[in-house]
Amino acid sequence: MQKIGYFFLNLSIFSILVLAASAQPSPSTVLPERERARIVDEILEDRFTNLLPQLMRREGIDMWVIISREYNEDPVLRTMLPSTWLSARRRTIMVFFDNGKEIEKLAIARYDVGNLLKGAWDIDVRPNQWEALAKIIEDRKPKKIGLNTSLNYGHADGLSFSEHEEFLKRLPADYVKRIVSAEKIAVGWLETRTEKEMAIYPLICRLSHQIIQEGFSEQVIQPGVTTTDDVVWWFRQRITSLGLDTWFHPTVDVQRADTQQFEHLRTFSKRPDKQVIMPGDLLHVDFGITYLRLNTDQQQHAYVLRSGETDVPEAIKTAFKQGNRLQDILTEQFKAGKTGNQMLLAALDQSKKEGIMGTIYSHPIGVHGHAAGPTIGLWDQQKGVPGPGDYPLLANTAYSIELNAAVEIPEWKKVVRIMLEEDGFFDGQSFRYIDGRQTEIYTIPRKLGYVK
């Protein structure tokens, strides 16, 4: 994939974003809606202009048709709507046609779709929307017509059964034969992160990290009083108060020196969801935000100091290092063209050689939380994931490196799971964490001199 042309964000907007990355999160460090809309629309225009032609030509499809109805939006179409459109309007049909010189961007709809897709339906000439679409197709004579149908990705399977049927009824038989799945274009559109997006993604990940650090501190947690459920709802309220959104409900849980054993993720998922946080607890959070149409997904740990303790016990520190090492083992497998299953199996084989009891369930991230692209294991499918796991790693894609290392803590006489998740980016040559990763466990109260 060729590099996408980079542009500098409006200086005033970029300054506000930098402020948000360097200051404690507050509503004043999150962009106002109008400025957010400006960034969203600039990024979208860049994607249409530079990314879309590359994807259509890479897959050899000269016409891509996306059909969607209000309240039942195609997942791809939702990412193509301008900032002022919160959903499709009635039936919205987008047509992208490669005429050899440029990509025509047409809307078979009652309205222009923002400034980027001009309305191509004259309702006075052709009152029937399907006939208007058929006329557009006949006039352009595409060799292949890509539709959003897919067995492997819900993201790329947005064409409903009834809309598909209606479309086929109006399309001349010769063109019906030219229909193909647009799965790879759809996945490519969703998984590819442009340079414009990567200019702001680190700031979004940093904001998410800051909220975790604030939640896992003495400002929020009073040992012996605060429950895990209290912290979960603090996170939800904090997101709302900052004017942000999330794509999943956070979880907060504890592991401690007790008789509960969570030797498998299936049993770990049944742990209590409301526990009073006590000194000596190892806390874990799974948390993410949605901002400027990009998502984060992060898991980190904190330790509640006992009376007289000034640091995390060495056994837990050692366990955490195994989690970091498992991250390294996986990201060392990031090579362009490798499939998710190949990376998974190679990483698990290496972790076994190093004596690490690892489980890997990493996934793409971007405009969706569990995004399109190569699936790198599921917690209950550690031998490979048919379909999404067979998809190759491509340049300019982002991932949540999600996994856990099960480690024996002798003092506790039990196994703990170091469950980590951090967002990263693969540029085609190397992998990097978008805003670093946790390499030390937070302490509550926070010890002096901590550096992330």
Image (cartoon, grey):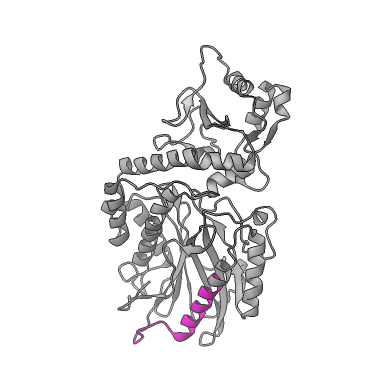
Q: Nearer the viewer, residue 317 or 345?
A: 345
x, y percent for residue 221: 35, 69
Closer-to-camera residue (227/399):
399
Asked if the stretch drawn in magenta spans residue 315, the answer is yes
Which residue does the image show at 39% across and 53% down from the upper left?
199
Question: Residue 73: x, y in percent?
Answer: 53, 36
Say which quadrant the C terminus sits in.
Answer: bottom left
Q: Is 391 left or right of 72, judged from the image as shown?
A: right
Q: Position of residue 103 (x, y in %)?
A: 53, 32
Q: Is residue 403 magenta?
A: no
Residue 286 vs residue 153, the one in the foreground: 153
Q: What range is drawn magenta here?
A: 306-327
Q: Residue at x 64, y 60 (%)?
A: 338
Q: Main secondary structure of the magenta part?
A: helix
Q: Is residue 381 visible?
A: no
Name the side, left or right, on which 404 lies relative to 221: right
Residue 155 place in picture, x, y as percent: 58, 45
Name the image quarter holding residue 84: top left
